[in-house]
Image (cartoon, helix red, strand yellow):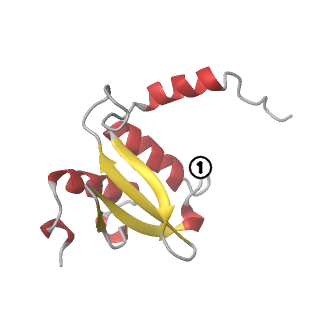
Amino acid sequence: MMADQWMTEDQRYCYEMLCDWLCGAHHVPTVKPFGSGIKVSVWSSRLSTFDFDQLTRLVLLAHDRCVRVELANGGPRRTGVVLHRRHAREGCIAQRHPTIEEALTLHRMRWPTPLPEAS
């Protein structure tokens, strides 16, 4: 069955973000419904912040596109990625999603000083 035959508009929106994150629909693993969102299982070894920057790209895309992302169990050596679309930047925590700039401002309030650079 084609994924788009069962997807709601919000699930389709999340799927399109996955396609961008993974550099094309041909790289997206099997997509399953997960409540009002979707879930995929990806290789854990690719989730990092720099050299294999899939984790960073995922976080940035999520904040840009107002999509809540959760990492979950995806099976042996795999990580589940759960996506739920949010429709607002303000409001209750279960319905909104901040921009990356807002998230960074909150982060700097909690941890104001990054570690000094190594010499």
How many numbered markers are drawn?
A: 1
Q: Is residue 69 left or right of residue 75?
A: left
Identified at 56% across, 66% down, the residue is 44
Q: Secondary structure at mark 1?
A: loop
Q: Is residue 53 left or right of residue 38?
A: right
Q: Position of residue 85 (x, y in %)?
A: 28, 46
Identified at 33% across, 33% down, the residue is 96
Q: Quadrant of the N terminus?
A: bottom left
Q: Position of residue 94 (x, y in %)?
A: 34, 38
Q: Position of residue 101 (x, y in %)?
A: 46, 26
Quarter of the image where one finds residue 30: bottom left
Q: Is the residue marked by circle 1 packed among few (<14), some (14-19), or many (20+) residues within 10 Å?
A: few
Residue on which disc 1 sits = 49
Quarter of the image where one finds residue 68: top left
Above or below — where is 62 with respect to 18?
above
Identified at 34% across, 57% down, the residue is 18
In depth, the one of 50 and 5 nearer the eye is: 5
Above or below — where is 84 with respect to 97?
below
Label 1 amino acid?
Thr
Q: Residue furthest right?
A: 119
Quarter of the image where one finds residue 4: bottom left
Q: Is residue 68 left or right of residue 33?
A: right
